[in-house]
Image (cartoon, rainbow, N blue to C red):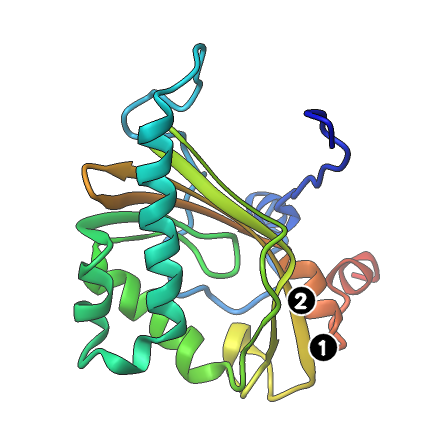
Amino acid sequence: MDGKIVETALFCDLLHLMQQAGQYPLPPQTGMHLVQPGPATHDGLLFADADPSEGEKTLAVINEMIGDINTHEKYQTPQQELARCWHDDMLWWGPEGIGATYTIDRYIEQHQRPFRTQIKDRIYNGHICRLGEGNFGGFFGWANLTVPNGGGYLGLPAGVPAEMRVVDMYRRDGDKLVENWIFIDILHYLHMQGVDVLERMSTL
């Protein structure tokens, strides 16, 4: 408001910390467990204003990608959908519980297919903000999605609708997205389905 920050949110991946401490509470995740690094190009810290037109390009690709997600049924294959906005060798740095993945094909296998087949009747709640600066951009929602678990997602049985609070950050290379860091409040999502991970672990 008036050019000043009025609200912030901080996501701490406590599930990742638990995994490193040998106290992992979930079934094996579909993607690789890795500590999320910074950009492969090592230019994630911007010490000067970026060219506004570059940020506009980044945000345009992100908006197009979001549009494809919401209309994915019109594409013959997931590969056809993703190839419009993603590099073939995309890097997707997912949260603990899902994991990281590399290339479009592995992303489909390790994240997109489980999400789209094990989540039913997804409700899109919108984003609080979308942004782009230079080759980087992203969005934030509280909550982005309300998603009933159709059975099997994150090892849970079918359950009630639950919120997904998500922060998504991207790096653009040329006219496509090449890296994505995604943070999801998995503990909140599980808690809404009756699984209080922290309470359960405190009793062990």
Mark 1 sits on what residue?
193
Q: Nearer the viewer, residue 50 or 17?
A: 50
| Quadrant hosting residue 137 | top left
Label 1 environment density (alpha carbons within 10 Å; few <14, some 14–19, many ≥20): some
Q: Is residue 34 above or below residue 136?
A: below
Up/down of 117 relative to 3, above or below: below
Q: Position of residue 168 (x, y in %)?
A: 49, 48
Identified at 22% across, 78% down, the residue is 75
Side (left or right) of 37 relative to 6 = left
Which residue has dot 2 on it?
189
Judging depth in this view, the residue of 40 and 56 nearest the camera is 56
Secondary structure beneath label 1: loop
Would you place residue 181 above or below residue 31 in this image? above
In percent of the image, x 37 and y 68: which residue is there?
A: 69
* Residue 198 screen position, x and y as percent: 77, 58
Q: Which mark is drawn over residue 61?
A: none
Q: SS for tag 2?
A: helix
Asked whether the residues under the numbered discs 1 and 2 touch, taking CB atoms below 8 Å apart as contact, a structural biologist would say yes
Q: Residues within 10 Å of mark 2 (few under 14, many from 20)?
A: some
> Separation of disc 1 and disc 2 at Cα?
7 Å
Q: Is residue 97 left or right of residue 75?
A: right
Which percent across, then down, holds residue 47?
45, 10
| Residue 148 appears left or right of 178 | right
Q: Quadrant of residue 202?
A: bottom right
Residue 199 percent across, percent down from the top left:
82, 61
Residue farthest toward the front in the current orientation of the protein:
2
Residue drawn where x is 39% and y is 43% of the image: 59
